[in-house]
């Protein structure tokens, strides 16, 4: 697969051909991926995980940072970046509420490039932009009274197409 280039900006993007690869498979196959401005990979990287991962899990040291200016990751629902070996590595987070255990605050990341197509340093104060998302209602319903309160609350926000998680 050849990286996709924008002929106006000279920015190239390569998408890893598989998501959530086994760590050994990732280590072997990523050596053959072509250089580009941006690498897209959908999978967990242990330094970003908020949970215990196996010792052989993919880590920052395994990422091919020598061939990319930005490695944009997916899978973990957080917005977090680090500079590693001169490469910006991180997760932009989801733009929609995806899981009951994540916060409803969402954002988008603006990546800026110079005229030659080289990545300019990320400024979290201006380049991570909060976005408005749908209302999220999470409740545990144990009895009829709690159900009545939930129905009341849902009626108030129904026109805003809320995301509802009920246990």
Image (cartoon, helix red, strand yellow):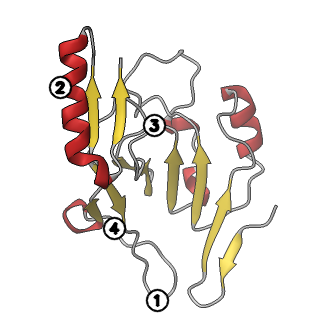
In front of the other: 4 or 144 = 144
Viewer-side label of 4, 3: 3
Q: Is residue 48 above or below residue 146?
A: below
Which quarter of the figure has residue 47? top left
Give the residue at the far right of this rendering: 1
Earlier sequence position, callout 3 versus callout 1? 3
Image location of residue 8, percent across then percent down: 60, 91
Q: Residue at x 76, y 36 (%)?
A: 28
Which element is circle 3 on? Answer: loop
Q: Is residue 42 left or right of residue 60?
A: right
Q: Residue at x 59, y 54 (%)?
A: 40
Image location of residue 69, percent across then percent down: 51, 63
Image location of residue 140, percent across then percent down: 27, 16
Which residue is tagged 3? 76
Viewer-side label of 3, 1: 3
- Disc 1 from disc 4: Cα separation: 14 Å
> What's the mark number on residue 97?
none
Which residue is tagged 1? 115
Q: Is residue 27 above or below residue 118?
A: above
Crowd around label 4: few <14 · some 14–19 · many ≥20 (10 Å)? some
Q: Is residue 104 visible?
A: no
Earlier sequence position, callout 1 versus callout 4? 1
> What's the mark number on residue 149?
2
Which residue is tagged 4? 121
Earlier sequence position, callout 2 versus callout 4? 4
In front of the other: 97 or 140 = 140
Which element is circle 1 on? Answer: loop
Earlier sequence position, callout 4 versus callout 3? 3
- Disc 2 from disc 4: Cα separation: 48 Å
Q: Is residue 3 above or below residue 98?
A: below
């Amino acid at each position: 697969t050849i990286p996709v280039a924008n002929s106006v900006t000279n920015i190239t993007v390569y998408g890893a051909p598989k998501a959530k690869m086994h760590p050994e498979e990732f280590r072997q196959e990523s050596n053959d991926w072509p250089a580009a401005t941006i690498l897209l990979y959908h999978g967990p990287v242990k330094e970003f995980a908020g949970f215990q991962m196996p010792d052989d899990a993919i880590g920052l040291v395994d990422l091919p940072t020598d061939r990319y200016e930005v490695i944009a990751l997916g899978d973990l629902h957080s917005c977090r970046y680090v500079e590693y070996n001169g490469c910006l590595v991180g997760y932009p987070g989801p733009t929609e509420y995806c899981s009951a255990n994540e916060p409803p605050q969402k954002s988008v990341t603006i990546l800026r490039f110079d005229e030659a197509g080289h990545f300019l340093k990320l400024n979290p104060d201006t380049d991570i932009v909060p976005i408005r998302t749908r209302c999220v209602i999470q409740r545990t319903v144990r009895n009829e009274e709690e159900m009545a309160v939930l129905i009341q609350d849902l009626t108030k926000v129904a026109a805003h197409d809320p995301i509802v998680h009920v246990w």
